[in-house]
């Protein structure tokens, strides 16, 4: 072993424990540790037959700790740190009700605060509608700190301001979406209103909310189909459960028309 190789080995022997220690300290610093008296947000969800409920997604933010981000030009900047959690819903033993609670105060050295939660669900894999199609998740999103975070996208969707506990009921219709460009792709999802409009938005900005109850009503017998054109100059076509056709507004079916058919 020559002299330069010995120096490299000695340097590694010194650096590896240091790097491991730094990583361990960073892990401790950023660990969630909700205090015992933290206020909880409880979400209950009635699961319709033919629907699969996904774990609750929670996003915590901290101004005490920061993340290094990059601009489009490759420059670095510091932003509030974020960390996510995934919590399974637990059966309440009656009427297909599932629920989960999440701490608003994430505690720890970073003093984490719950920023947003998302509730996702989808058509179950054993549902005949799924055969030969890609299944797309549908979600409700809740912003707790007023950051404008709706479904992980800032400032895109309309947001409903809501104070106190929520009891949400929404009619959903299975929507088959046939795409031709750039490649053939067929998806199925649960359509519950044109979420570009506040009236039917599934995004909420919460204030003093401790309990959220979600009761989706899924009309599996009322399937709507949305098909894109075969070329760039054609129109989208929507086929409603009664067989009528139309050109969709904002690439979405007419929700009022669907509600009249439920």
Image (cartoon, rainbow, N blue to C red):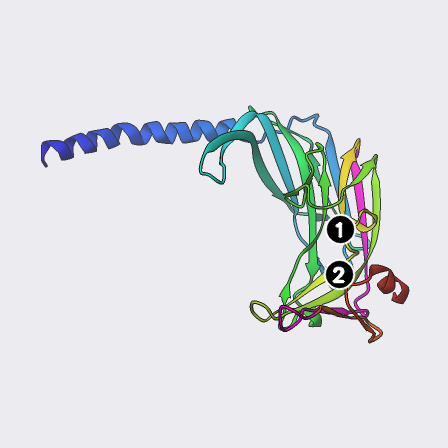
Q: Residue at x 70, y 72 (%)?
A: 128
- Reading the image, the residue beneath label 1 is 196
In which quadrant of the rendered view does residue 193 lie? bottom right
Tell me the magenta residue range: 209-234
Q: Is residue 1 left or right of residue 183?
A: left
Is 7 placed above or below 49 here? above
Residue 219 magenta-highlighted? yes
Q: Residue furthest front?
A: 233
Q: Closer to the N terminus: mark 2 or mark 1?
A: 1
* Mark 1: few/some/many CA within 10 Å (<14, 14-19, 20+): some
Residue at image x 61%, y 44%?
Answer: 86
Identify the secondary structure beneath mark 1: loop
Q: Which residue is mark 2?
A: 252
Question: Looking at the image, which is closer to me, 236 or 11?
Answer: 236
Q: Is residue 183 above or below residue 106?
A: below
Q: Nearer the viewer, residue 236 or 150?
A: 236
Q: Circles 2 and 1: CB distance less than 8 Å?
A: yes
Farthest right residue in view = 260
């Amino acid at each position: 072993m020559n002299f330069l190789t010995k120096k490299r080995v000695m340097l590694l022997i010194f650096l590896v424990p240091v790097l491991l220690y730094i990583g361990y300290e960073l892990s401790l610093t950023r660990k969630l540790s909700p205090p015992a008296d933290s206020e909880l947000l409880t979400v209950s969800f009635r699961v319709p037959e033919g629907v699969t409920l996904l774990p609750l997604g929670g996003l915590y933010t901290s101004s005490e700790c920061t993340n290094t981000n990059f601009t489009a030009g490759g420059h670095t900047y510091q932003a509030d740190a974020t960390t996510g959690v995934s919590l399974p819903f637990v059966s309440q033993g009656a009427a297909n009700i599932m629920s989960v609670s999440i701490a608003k105060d994430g505690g720890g050295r970073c003093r984490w605060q719950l920023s947003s939660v998302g509730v996702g669900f989808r058509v179950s894999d054993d549902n005949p509608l799924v055969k030969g199609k890609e299944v797309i998740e549908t979600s409700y999103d809740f912003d707790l700190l007023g950051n404008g975070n709706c479904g992980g996208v800032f400032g895109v969707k309309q947001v409903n301001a809501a104070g106190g506990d929520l009891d949400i009921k929404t009619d959903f219709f299975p929507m088959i979406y046939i795409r031709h460009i750039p490649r053939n792709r067929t998806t199925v999802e649960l359509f519950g209103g044109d979420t570009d409009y506040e009236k039917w938005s599934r995004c909420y900005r919460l204030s003093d909310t401790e309990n959220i109850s979600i009761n989706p009503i899924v009309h599996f017998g009322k399937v709507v189909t949305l098909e894109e054109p075969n070329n760039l100059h054609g129109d989208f076509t929507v086929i409603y459960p009664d067989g009528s056709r139309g050109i969709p507004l904002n690439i979405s079916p007419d929700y009022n028309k669907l509600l009249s058919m439920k």
